[in-house]
Image (cartoon, rainbow, N blue to C red):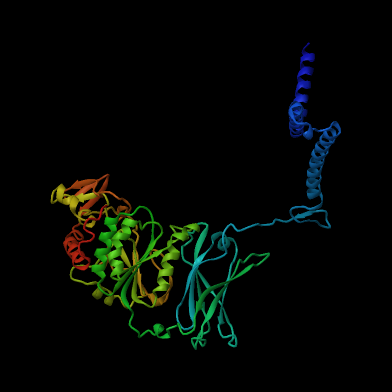
Amino acid sequence: MAKEKDQTTKDKNLLISFLWNFSAELKLVLMALLVLSTLATLLPFIPSSFAISASELRFCISRIAVNSSTSVNTNTTSLNNAVKNQPLTQETELSNGVIKRTFTGYGWAAYNFVLMNAYRGGVNTFAVIGLSSKPLHVYAHPTYRCEWVPLNQSDNRILTDGTKILTDWGYGRVYTTVVVNCTFPANAVINPRNDGGTLLLHATTGDTDRNITDSIPVLTEAPATVDFALYDSKLQQKYDYLYCGSSLYGNLSPQRIREWVAYHVRFFGERSHFVLHDAGGISDEVFEVLKPWIELGRVTVHDIREQERFDGYYHNQFMVVNDCLHRYRFMAKWVFFFDVDEFVYVPAKETISSVMESLKGYSQFTIEQMPMSSQLCYNGDGPARTYRKWGFEKLAYRDVKKVPRRDRKYAVQPRNVFATGVHMSQNLQGKTYHRAEKQIRYFHYHGSISQRREPCRHLYNGTRIVHENNPYVLDTTMRDIGLAVKTFEIRTIGDRLIRTRQ
């Protein structure tokens, strides 16, 4: 009895499997039968002039069956031929019987080179700034050649090897920042008659078995557009101090940006300029804070949001600061690199001019950090007055926990720098000075810029406190400057920002 049940079950399974394998054909047949049944039902109601004969009906059915069979057979035959006669990849049987397989790539996982810009660095040198595939530089050996193509075809082209500089210390992600230095022979003045021309960058992939080269026009000089006097070291620069900001992203506080700009415009003086890079952080409200200073010619904003297409470290900030360095290289004596939650300060008896004059023998100097709490506020004037003060006035508690090392920021004489980083440059000629903490420092309010709310989370009156097991001391250095900065802002741009919100 059990055997008969098993046999019955097997028969049912076999029937289900058979029906399942031919489900498409069965659906087609059932659909045809449904159509025919419908026609048979409607035939008595159709006028005689539209009558269908039996022979015509048989012909129609036979055509449906033939077409169905032909379609299935054609698809099967095509697939068999594709597998049998047209393999998707090449393969070869070697003399020893081994089948050699190949692998064919399609599309691009990452570009060979993503150009941001290129700049002339002198009469015979250029800098090309961009991104490149990080795996390419880790696992292959890509190289670069630079070629100057004169607009006047009767002049000779000039070729030289490019020197690549990887500036992001291995922090890159899919892409890494590359600065290519194109220095032509010392006796060659590129575009000497100012006739115009184009700089080509020949970027190779450096693969071991194949070496693909992309020839990229990176810079075009129109006739009579190069001012060679700009590269004369005796020429006075337009600015004494220029600020190159990293990528600004996130939901930035308009009030904190307002404070930072007003403070530093006053601090660096008339012959200074500030370059900010918008990676999505400059909202309409933040732009309203910057607008008065843009109109005065003190601030320039670059929209770099498109760089988000290319996955690099921290919104590609290494590429951004290098572009800023080379773009303004001949326009400023000194270029500063720090963030918008950091405030540079010199002692009361000094000025920024006197400090920089004492450091002019160095191509670069680093600036020591004074870490300030972005939550703890001094309540010496009472809560009501405290909350009305600017952020750097009330955030007056400095973290004095001993740590092996704190981050530093820096300034450079840009003519002596070939490429730069975020915390310092390692590609420069000349000396670097690391002991300027008695001359210049910066106060760091970490995280305060990205919070659109009142920064004070806790109010204290003591000169020494411990909060969450961290020791802090009251430091009123920045607090004491607050009134002077507010007065400067009103005198310079009026009261148009007085209602700025957090």
Q: Residue 323 versus residue 177: which sits nearer the camera?
A: 323
Q: Which of 498 and 176 is in front in this view?
A: 498
Q: Position of residue 398 (x, y in %)?
A: 24, 55
Residue for point 79% across, 21% down: 11
Residue 169 drawn above or below residue 226: above
Q: Report x, y in % for residue 17.
A: 75, 28
Q: Can residue 400 be seen in this view?
A: yes
User: Left of 23 or right of it: where is 121?
Assistant: left
Instruction: Residue at 21% x, 50% y: name it.
Output: 377
Looking at the image, residue 137 sits to the left or right of residue 360; the answer is right
Q: Where is residue 204 in the image (x, y as percent from the top left)?
A: 60, 69
In the image shown, does 24 or 315 lie closer to the viewer?
A: 24
State how many labels appear.
Answer: 0
Is residue 289 rendered to the left or right of residue 124? left
Residue 68 % position (x, y): 79, 38
Asked whether, in this view, residue 213 is left or right of residue 292, the answer is right
Q: In the picture shown, does residue 431 fall above or below 372?
A: below
Quadrant occupied by the N terminus: top right
Task: Return the residue found at the far right.
Answer: 55
